[in-house]
Amino acid sequence: MNAPYSMNLSNGKNGKNKPNTTTAVLFDLDGTLLPMDQDFFVKTYFKYLAEKFAPIGYDSKTLIDSVWKGTAAMVNNNGSGLNSDVFWKCFSEIHGEKSLDDIPLFEDFYRNEFQNAKAVCGFNPLAAKTIGFLKENGVRVVLATNPIFPAVATESRIRWAGLSPDIFELYTTYENSSYSKPNPAYYTEILSKINCAPEECIMVGNDVSEDMAAESLGMRVFLLTDCLINREGKDISLYPHGDFNDLMDYLKTQLCL
């Protein structure tokens, strides 16, 4: 597949065009570096979660509903606190303050039972190859996954994709983020942490609404279509897009290679 993308040029000295300087590339995780059917993954994940906590008195439906409400609270977080604090405040308002004593049990779930969800995810060796290519060319790499999971769960999913967490300069989790996608402030927070201007960065993701939101800041974007999510039915020809081979071609163009 040949993606119909524009080279996204900017004016240089003497009015000549040249590609933007690329300092860092940000990657989404679920459906991007880690192939998956997101709806099927979430159903599987919740199945194991409910099984874990039913024996200690959590009603399965109430538990899942409260996780969704906590997730919505994180998505709507306006920077008033860390996503983790926002989630557990919402969760404890439903299940009572005593439920906060179970936080270690949730962390244990992500270290153990959650690992079974790997079976419903795919694997694409081109993900690691692309990351390696960027690192070899001196480009900084950031994992810009929606920070609605704790670090232990995010690190697991990184490994499922055939990567090591320490290959990323930063990976966003609910413990280190105060915003979520599609809020542009989520990307602003990342840029502040890595000390980069948006024009120096490219965001790569599979979700039109969440990942392409980075473009509003002046960041270049690439829409990976292998596991495309386009809930609003937007015209994807507006963005550089395609599979990992197309992504590699695009990155080489942006890096002048």
Image (cartoon, rainbow, N blue to C red):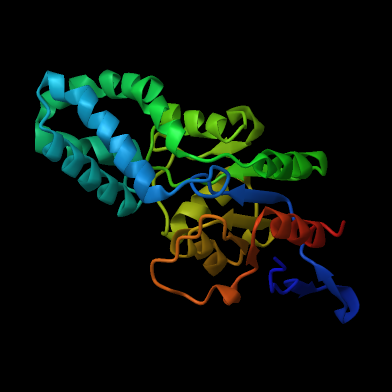
> 128 or 99: which is nearer to us?
128
**Quadrant position of residue 202:** bottom right
Left or right of 9 in this view: 55: left
Residue 35 locus on image (x, y percent)? 53, 45
- Seen in the picture, residue 161 relative to 57 is either above or below; the reply is below
Left or right of 191 in this view: 138: right
Q: Residue at x 53, y 32 (%)?
A: 160
Camera sees residue 183: yes
Residue occupying the far right of the picture: 14
- Seen in the picture, residue 89 relative to 72 is either above or below; the reply is above
Residue 54 locus on image (x, y percent)? 15, 25
- Seen in the picture, residue 225 relative to 92 is either above or below; the reply is below
Q: Residue at x 40, y 34 (%)?
A: 175
Residue occupying the far bottom of the picture: 15
Camera sees residue 179: no
- Seen in the picture, residue 255 relative to 194 is either above or below; the reply is below
> 241 or 66: which is nearer to us?
241
Q: Residue at x 69, y 44 (%)?
A: 126
Residue 21 locus on image (x, y percent)? 78, 59
Left or right of 172 in this view: 164: right
Q: Residue at x 65, y 58 (%)?
A: 243
**Quadrant position of residue 33:** top right
Quarter of the image with the N terminus in it: bottom right
Quarter of the image with the C terminus in it: bottom right
Residue 235 locus on image (x, y percent)? 51, 77
Number of dots carrying numbers: 0
